[in-house]
Amino acid sequence: MEKPRRLFGTNGIRKIVNRELTPEFAAKIGEAIGSFFRQGNILIGYDGRKSNIMLVNAVTSGLLSTGCKVYDGGMAPTPCIQYAVGNHKMDGGVMVTASHNPPEYNGIKVMWNDGVEITSRQEREIEDLFFKERIRLASWECIKQRFSLLGLLDEYRESIKRHINVAEIRKRHYHIVVDAGNGVASLVIPYLARDLGCKVTTINGDIDGTFPGRMPEPRPENLGSLAATITAIGADIGVAFDGDADRSIFVDDEGKVQWGDRSFALIEEDFLMMNQGETIVTPVSSSQVVKDIAEKYEGRLVWTKVGSIIVSHTMKRLKAKLGGEENGGVFYGPHQPVRDGAMSTALILSIMAKADETLSELFEALPRYYLVKDKVVCPTEQKINVFKTLNEEVNHLNPERIDGVKLWFPDNSSILIRPSGTEPIYRFYAEAKTKEKAVKLVKEYKEKLQHLISPREK
């Protein structure tokens, strides 16, 4: 049986521009998306990548050809477009972005009428229309127009402010350093911070699709300039964003970069203090600290497979109000159940103001774990057999099998071993109370996995 062809990955379609993602491809996928929505009202937006106007126009042409009415939301963060889809009662939305990928990439995300990205089943419907050429082109008199939808950035900013105590934050006069990463965060975050009474210093603030300041993924190793700026000017907080501003990584007042599940743990703790027993949704790759906080406040913790779309749809299904990822994604349901870097920033400022503590003090109060990541090459054709054998060997340890294998140990250390969905590798995420134990866990299970991989294929 022929394996089904796929366009969508774990988070939309992403390809290299003018190699795989051409205007012709974009127009055709626009036709498939338009056919899926059956002449609906579609909002389209885009981030700051160099190829975006070319691709937006191509996707728009495809949508219009099927009889859709297209509303142009302009350049904006992904969560801004997602909010606008629901707020303006659109039938769906399209965002042209490659999020945190390198500059040669671009991509296409498709949203349902609530702004949440469509399900895997709906993605397959669009792929079926694309590959089997079941496009529903409209007759000439049914072709509609493209309209500009103005004011979305202001609406989005105001919607965030409704979920926090603005007056309480304004009293603190925080100094925040915003690393926009040459992306669309600069269209919202500095203005939001000023609305909240903050003094704002911006770095990498010019929107530039070549990302000259740093690569678009905010990782500790490329946030040195942000950390140095904070300590040099005595700022209270720093925050860095990816290309489309749905993820945020925080740096405290001492210039220490804090990984995403620790900032999520601060938000989780504040949320559960006011909503004891509520459901928290997070991928199995998240830190033990998220589990510790949930147990402390009797929260119901629901683990998921890795992937922001999975978190969003799990939250929708369970009517959960909070979700988070270790990569800096926070999903605040009362606003919208999607990753939202601006909402995360407002929540962290609110927590600081409420506690009247520095960000470093708040992070210091969290349980401390050390995380070590690694990977090993495993040919794609061997992944299933290797996983099956690994499962058998660790079965006596009662593993969690939501996504790969996660082992929990009595000393609160753990290791997640999962095959990559996009590369011929297995990934390791080990966590422990000491760095030495985390390193030991990775070494032990990396060796174990290497023995399971056929030597001639390594």
Image (cartoon, rainbow, N blue to C red):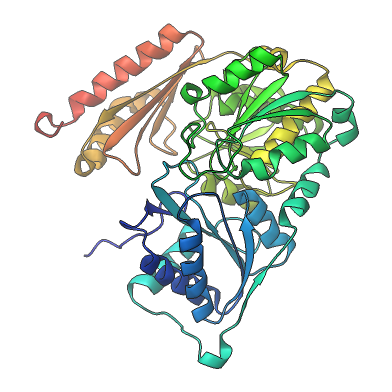
Residue 331 in sight in this render: no
Say which quarter of the image contains residue 189: top right
Locate residue 229, reporting x and y percent.
62, 19
286 on left or right of 132:
right
Locate residue 314, reporting x and y percent.
58, 48
Locate residue 422, reporting x and y percent.
33, 44
The residue closer to the viewer here, 317 or 336, is 336
Quadrant showing the C terminus: top left
Q: Residue at x 59, y 18 (%)?
A: 227
Q: Residue at x 40, y 71 (%)?
A: 28
Residue 400 in sight in this render: yes
Say which quarter of the image contains residue 363: top right
Q: Is residue 123 above or below residue 193?
A: below
1 on left or right of 159:
left
The residue closer to the viewer here, 230 or 418, is 230
Q: Is residue 61 above or below residue 112?
A: below
Q: Which residue is outermost to the left?
A: 456
352 on left or right of 315:
right
Locate residue 105, reporting x and y percent.
40, 48
Q: Residue at x 40, y 74 (%)?
A: 129
